[in-house]
Image: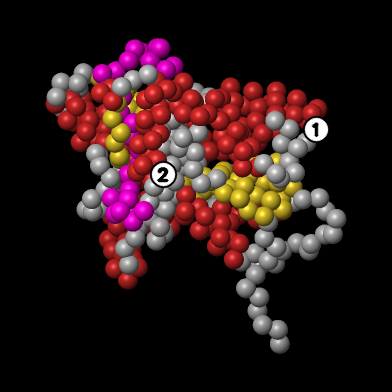
Amino acid sequence: MPLPSPYRSEPAYQHGQPGRTGVLLCNLGTPDAPTAAAVRRYLAQFLSDPRVVEIPRIVWLPILHGIILRVRPAKSAQKYASIWTPEGSPLKVWTERQAQALGSALAAQAHDVVVRYAMRYGNPSIAAELDALKADGATRVLIVPAYPQYSGTTTASVCDAVYEWAARTRNIPELRFVQRYHDDAGYIAALAARIRTHWDAHGQPDQLVMSFHGVPERTLQLGDPYHCECHKTGRLLASALGIGKDRYKVTFQSRFGKAKWLEPYTEPTLVALAQAGTQRVDVVCPGFTSDCLETLEEINMEAREAFLHAGGKAFHYIPCLNGDAAWIEALAGISAQHLAGWPTQGSADGAALAGSRAAALALGAAQ
């Protein structure tokens, strides 16, 4: 009797079939709906990841399932409901649009690739979309995380999910990973243009606050480069905007639990600015490429209220890059750089046709 195989059933290999190249844009994830049940499923997957919570499983899992997943989903569901759109979760909507526009932008450069998007937690899953790319004939896949700054809690977790899928796959495609683009010139230029556009319409603030997602301070001590890469993005962005150190601050948001996280924390910084007499702040979130709960609710609602309540007069939230045309071009440039050497070049006629489609998609997606 044959032993059971650890691998899943796959389509039979076809000799002579030309291989294709796939690109998978990966974002963090989102619940399927703004309900307690959907949020509970999402948080159970997210907070069970040892990359996210580096506490021994024997200690953490009883806390997670015995306390957090009983209390937090209902509260979080209310927050998700406050930013939900008719199309669904903003993060999922924008990530899908970015993937579509990225495919068109790469086609305009004569790259014959198939682009999909996936979520590290929730749907569509990385495993499901890698299966779909294989079904599309992809024998080479570039993984593009939606995180400009590398962290073990985010970028490395995407790698884990890809490797877990590969461990169950018999015929593994050739894989490449984009690790970081925190200092990419196109990314910085797109951020700067986004901010300048806002300033052209509304004037400049007393302070620009660049709020990045926080991680436990312990990760920095253990060698995670995230803190340094956030600060480099901040310095490059300030330089592109022509503002000095006295005009901007780099802060960290979304603290969870009682452990010390990267400082300074965003909301306390905003409160301190207001109490010190700062009249207007503009807040931008460079580490988020799509608007989501952490930007639309935590920053544009909770942080706004905290600043104004502390005596501030004007709070401006500058949206994420989302479907901005300059950002899509930057993302295409980053992807093309990592596609180098793979046979992706299509026809000039196809590129010209795709170029028109890319322009239409970028304009339609941009805010």
Q: Secondary structure at mark 1?
A: loop
Residue 27 against residue 309 in the figure, above or below? below
- Tell how many labels: 2
Which of the two marks, 2 or 1, is nearer to us in this view? 1
* Residue for point 42% across, 22% down: 240
- Please tell me how crowded label 2 is: few (under 14), some (14-19), or many (20+) other residues with Cα within 10 Å: many
Position of residue 205 in the picture relative to residue 233 (left or right): left
Q: Quadrant of the N terminus?
A: bottom right
Q: In the rendering, which numbered label is found on residue 347?
A: 1
Q: Residue most toward the right? A: 16
Which residues are the magenta region?
196-223
Distance, label 2 to label 1, CA atoms, is: 44 Å
Picture quadrant of residue 12: bottom right
- Please tell me how crowded label 1 is: few (under 14), some (14-19), or many (20+) other residues with Cα within 10 Å: few
What's the residue type where badge 2 is placed? Pro
* Residue for point 68% across, 66% down: 170
* Residue for point 40% across, 40% down: 229
Is residue 145 in view from this perspective? yes
| The magenta stretch spans residue 200 | yes
What's the residue type where badge 1 is placed? Ser
Residue 359 position within the rendered picture, expressed as x and y whole percent measured from the top left: 64, 23
Q: Residue most toward the bottom? A: 1
Residue 185 position within the rendered picture, expressed as x and y whole percent measured from the top left: 50, 29
* Residue for point 37% across, 19% down: 242
Position of residue 110 in the picture relative to residue 131 (left or right): right
Residue 267 against residue 37 in the figure, above or below? above
Residue underneath mark 2: 34
